Image (cartoon, rainbow, N blue to C red):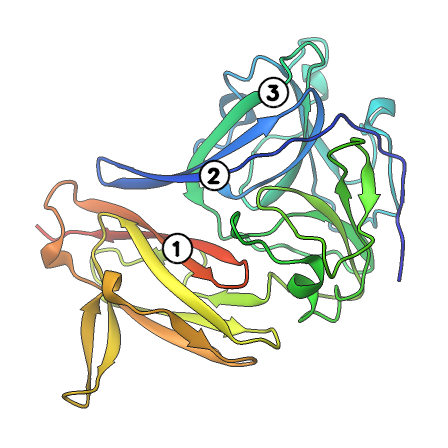
Amino acid sequence: MKRLRILISVATLTLSLFFICSVANGQSVVTQTFTLKPGWNAIFLEVQPDPRDPAKVFAGMEHLDSAWTWLSRESTAEFIQEPEEGLWGQPGWHAYFTAETEMFLTNLYAVLGNQAYLIKIKQTAPSEITWEVTGSPSLRKNRWLADSFNFVGFHLDPGNPPTFQDFFAPSPAHAGQAAYRLNNQSGKWEFVQNPATTKLRAGEAYWVYCEGASDFQGPLSLDLPMSNGLRYGAVSKVVTVTLSNLSEDTRTATFTSSGKVVLYYEGYDKESGYFTLYPLGQMPPQVIDSGRSLNVWLEVRREKMDLEPSLSESVLQILDDRGVRLRVPVSAERIQ
């Protein structure tokens, strides 16, 4: 097992996270809420803000000193330097600064969803501050840098997160490899000693080693016909969602939707012996055996949608019983 020599010393991170699906004017968005402490905080942003301009994303955060993210796809991260000694100039780091004397150093020009960040809060801030980010659920995938530590986070159920061992078990590139997280007591990066009993947390960022190439996103894999969600437009009627269980355990997935797009799913009617359409809200939990895939046909019912606005949006949530939570943005046009 490879280990990472970590010299980082940061203020204690207290992270609380919840999601709200709010619908207004036909739009459905997700709000991610963080509780941050003075000093350095390691977070995982799951939503895509709009606009992406850091000055607008961080507007109102009067206690923000700087925000950093690691975007390297070429240089390995053999060492993570002490932030107070300066991350600037280290390969792969991009930052946004709020101080007028440091603004010229900014090289982070867009805040992306599905991305890990180090957020530095001024020491003069209160003991806890709340930061809310609203946007569409992001479907960007982790692009792992081989034979290196990667600064990443994952899409997890806050109420039932998996252990490190269970989450990474299906991936040869990650199973048994080193991972580091911030110790909430000491405020330092700490090696995960007991991955079999230590649980991941939603909204938290980690350093995870990737041995060789990998496209692993989690033990429950989601495949869509389009990369940015379920976009029915004005023509498409049926879209297939594919879930693959990469783990050795059976998983049960529950589908729910919030918003104004009316979705039906195709299910088997035992009485008639035919497949028929049912409202998504009536869909029973779906069992996916180990190593198997499940195809779900989702049909939009435009005739049941409001005439105004013409473009309606929703958020499709897929939650399994082993700690994975996936969110998919959905949109459809209503024909006048």
Place of residue 249 in the rendered image (x, y in percent of width and height, measured from the top left): 58, 75
Place of residue 158 in the rendered image (x, y in percent of width and height, measured from the top left): 53, 47
Q: Which residue is mark 1?
A: 317
Q: Which residue is mark 3?
A: 128
Q: Residue at x 82, y 48 (%)?
A: 75
On the picture, is 10 further left or further right than 64? Answer: right
Say what secondary structure mark 2 lies in.
Answer: loop
- Residue 215 appearing in the image: no
**Residue type at mark 2?**
Phe
The mark that comes first in sequence, 1 or 2, is 2
Say what secondary structure mark 3 lies in.
Answer: loop
The mark that comes first in sequence, 3 or 1, is 3
- Residue 234 appearing in the image: yes
- Structural distance between the alpha carbons of marks 1 and 2: 14 Å
Q: Residue at x 62, y 77 (%)?
A: 248
CB of mark 2 within 8 Å of CB of mark 3?
A: no
Please identify the residue farthest to the front as the structure is shown: 197
Q: Residue at x 59, y 73 (%)?
A: 246
Q: Nearer the viewer, mark 3 or mark 1?
A: 3
Say what secondary structure mark 1 lies in.
Answer: strand
Q: Which residue is mark 2?
A: 18
- Structural distance between the alpha carbons of marks 3 and 1: 30 Å
On the picture, is 279 further left or further right than 154? Answer: left
212, 36: nearer the viewer: 36
| Dot 2 alpha-carbon crowd within 10 angstroms: few under 14, some 14 to 19, many 20 or more | some
29, 191: nearer the viewer: 191
**Residue type at mark 3?**
Glu
Residue 33 vertical position relative to residue 39 in the rendered view, above or below: below
